[in-house]
Amino acid sequence: MIAGQSSILGVYNFLEENESLSAAQLAARQRHLMRTQLEFARQESPYFANVLRHRPTGELLDSPERWADIPLMDKAVLLENFDMVRTRTDIAFLNVDRYLSDRSLVDEPFNGSDLLVVSTAGTSGKPGYFVYDPREQAHIRAQYFRFMRAILAAIKPQGPLRSAAIIVTGAHMIGYKMQQHLPPEFFRMIPVLREGHAVSVEETAAELADFNPQILTCFGSTLRMLTEYKEANPDFSWRPLALINTGATLERDVRQRAIAAFEGVQVFDLYGSTDTGYIGWTCEQGSMHLNTDCMRIEILDEDNRPVADGEFGSIVISTYWHRTLPIIRYRLGDLMSVSTESCACGRSLPVVKELLGRENTLLYRRAETGLAPVPQGVFMEMFETIEGVRRFRLVQESLDRVTVSVVPLPDSPPGLAERVAQRVAPVFGKGASVDVDIVDALVPPASGKLLPVERLFDPTTERAVLR
């Protein structure tokens, strides 16, 4: 674990200390943390014992060429080698798979233990399985509190602080599981689906007005939806101080429109993944800092070589704190460039120049009053409840045409395409065509980032393709 810390406060204090270190001091600390993690993985994980064989730790840290010899891994590699990567014998893949495949166990602990066992949504083609022990959970929370400290410094709230999150609820996902037991008087989870039906923007707005959180966390697609609602309903009484975008990169126009619509609000970004924890976060000066005191971050070109300073490349991460399932040279599938400039806030952590991507996961349907938004979370939760689905990809090509590709489970009952169409079609209303294809695998685009839900047109023109 980082600096031997196992409590939230201990990790938080360690992270806070790192922000004031010089570049040389931070580099020395990173080297020590990486050495410790490599030695742990070599000793405790059969997979890494084999991978790191004949690769002395000192050489790996001193030689970029030797470091590059370590094979890259991703979700698929982790799943295929789960029982070899793990460092505990009580988390066999079959048991984890059985637990995560049963939605009725969402609110039950894994085998009665204190382990946090979660899955991803499969945005890169396959869902991943991840396990966190209490110390690792403390690291995740401490990373989040670091981010919240920057937000509070920026917004300076008065009185009791309330926050809310609009997320997929009742699923084996980390956002739901890590927040489900927070005090309801200070935190509220607002679902995107209720009793199998999409929660309308009007219902969401009413809940926000009722709870009145100063801070809201949501996907960028939901942020766009709420901004459009506020623009159309100036009397909407909710007055947030901070909006936190998670998931895909937020389009510039959405950020500007949200700031204009919700007078006095500040918009922040929180970049992370179930796989690796929090990676980057916006400080009070508006820069996104990278948690390089929690992980080693490589930016690689298409030949897996480091890019030049400031250039785009694929993100590869080696964390210092994953012990249950070590993460070393793990490819996320996202693209990033890192700035060579420092931030006015004074933190020593590097700054993101740009994250590649845009927020086109908010879909639309025709309604009596014009266009009604449909956030991606509706489908993330819907497909959790459709029997026989392993993975899916839903693409809205136009207001009247939707295509769905579905990878079935091996024992999927007959009629899967019909079941999917029957659930999806009502969301888009009469006149919308929903075509369902049963496929063996989902093929990612060149970027490697396969969005499960995507819109390919501009709703303001109904013509312009966003590809």
Image (cartoon, rainbow, N blue to C red):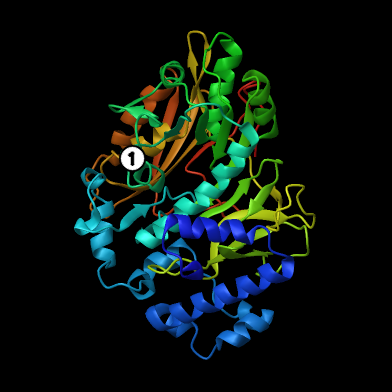
Quick check: 343 left or right of 96?
Answer: right
Closer to us: 33 or 161:
161
User: Which image quarter: residue 324?
Assistant: bottom left
Closer to us: 408 or 55:
55
Q: Position of residue 162 (x, y in %)?
A: 46, 29
Closer to us: 365 or 359:
359
Question: Residue at (42%, 67%) from the top-left corner?
Answer: 78
| SS for callout 1 | loop
Quick check: 354 left or right of 448?
Answer: right
Closer to us: 449 or 321:
321
213 w.r.t. 345: above or below: above
Residue at the far front in the pictured view: 159
Q: Position of residue 98 (x, y in %)?
A: 23, 57
286 w.r.t. 364: above or below: below
Question: Residue at (40%, 56%) from the top-left corner?
Answer: 137
Q: Position of residue 239 (x, y in %)?
A: 55, 19
Residue at the far bottom in the pictured view: 54
**Residue type, numbered disc 1:** Gln
Question: Residue at (28%, 35%) from the top-left corner?
Answer: 419
- Any part of residue 362 in sight: no
237 w.r.t. 334: above or below: above
Instruction: Estimate how packed mark 1 is, as few (under 14), some (14 to 19) or many (20 or more) residues with alpha carbons within 10 Å.
Output: some
Quick check: 347 left or right of 205?
Answer: right
Q: Position of residue 217 (x, y in %)?
A: 50, 35
Q: Determine which residue is flagged by label 1.
A: 180
- Any part of residue 460 in sight: yes
Which quadrant holds the C terminus?
top right
54 w.r.t. 288: above or below: below
